[in-house]
Image: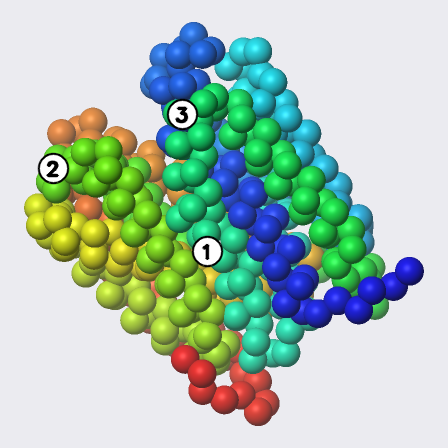
Amino acid sequence: MRFNVSKNMILAIFMLGTFAVGMTEYVVTGLLTQFAADLNVDVSTTGLLLSVYAISVAVFGPLLRVMTIKFSPKPLLLSLIGVFILSNILAATAPTFDVLLLSRLLSAAMHAPFFGICMSLAAQISAPEKRTGAIAAVQGGLTIAVMIGVPFGSFLGGALDWRLVFWFIAALGVLTFIGLSFVTPNIKPTEAPQLKKEMGIFKNKNILMVIAIIVFGFSGVFTAYTFKEPMLREFAGFGITGVTAGLFFFGLGGVVGNMASGKIQPSRLTERLIAALGMFSIVLALFTFLLPYAFLALVMCFLFGAGAFGLVPILNAKIIIGAPEAPSLSGTIAASVFNLANAIGATLGTILLNTGLTYTMITLVAAGMMAFGMFLTILMHIVEDKSLFQNTGETEQS
């Protein structure tokens, strides 16, 4: 039986999947105390659940995609979400911390290929001028997870049992599996993907510049974000309610920033990226100085989220659209590089804090990294092949 499926329905199912995967990645930040108490480990040890996940996405994601590059997208997506369901069931039933850590490794392995294939398919089924918006829609599931899924999971785990959070995510995975089985377009390439040709992405000057911007610029997001909760407590004097409000406004800003970036035409991505990095560096530089004022603290949290998640779809689009030689690998590389940047940023922030730097100094370092990313983007604007991002009949929508 064949179903006539609209592009919006396909994107909605992709968003459900990225929401579930995003919730799995970030929800543990609000459950570390429960993990420590139930599994009899130190809270500091539970931090491995975050760092191991990010590093595993960066390392194992591309390896898994290389191994499965000749697979058709639809069966591969179903297999990946199957691994996701099993990993969350394993987490929900984990008798020890080691088993919980193993479940994180399994989730992390499927993260980058799943995001990458969803973003690539979204771009393929969209008109050239709509590709940025389609990629942003897929990424939107993650931003909504940060805004709603993570606070809900933290509440559910704190009020009842952290294991219920993973059962809930596994159920989302099952719904995604059902949805994907019906709506995913069974697109088969006219010629089988060739790994040697796809690996040419690492010789593409456009892509190498974007990767440098993410690693040396965007990583500043997590240099500051890692300590956002203690900053809100120290500078704004927020308690549980205030911190929760700050996290919500961060997520809300992420959703708004993601949607706004999705309206940018491909030909204007680079110049908008320059402006976004410049404005975000100013937000980070002013962050701790404005936190003591409650209203401004919430505004800054909103702008922080808008800046962080507003940059992501632009950078994703720069990689996916800018690497026509790697239609199967580009999306996975994009997702992996972002997680590598997350790990670098969080590690750098921790090192700086341990060397005696204040939170204000750390946010200024993060602002400097964003400014450096802007400088790299200006260089990219000079040397990149702009013909890849030009579309006939393109109209200004941004």
Identify which amino acid the numbered label 1 is placed on.
Answer: Ile
Identify which amino acid the numbered label 2 is placed on.
Answer: Gly
Identify which amino acid the numbered label 3 is placed on.
Answer: Ala
The residue identified by callout 1 is 211
The mark nearer the N terminus, 3 or 1, is: 3
Q: Residue at x 60, y 18 (%)?
A: 93
Q: Do the CB atoms of the residues marked 3 and 1 lie less than 8 Å apart? A: no
The residue identified by callout 3 is 159
Residue 312 point in image, percent of width and height: 43, 58
Q: Secondary structure at mark 3?
A: helix
Q: Is residue 391 visible to us here? A: yes
Residue 126 point in image, percent of width and height: 64, 73
Outermost residue, right side: 1
Residue 54 disc label: none
The residue identified by callout 2 is 237
Toward the viewer: 255 or 333?
255
Asked if residue 95 lies left or right of residue 26, the reply is: right
Please tell me how crowded label 2 is: few (under 14), some (14-19), or many (20+) other residues with Cα within 10 Å: some
Q: Do the CB atoms of the residues marked 1 and 2 lie less than 8 Å apart? A: no
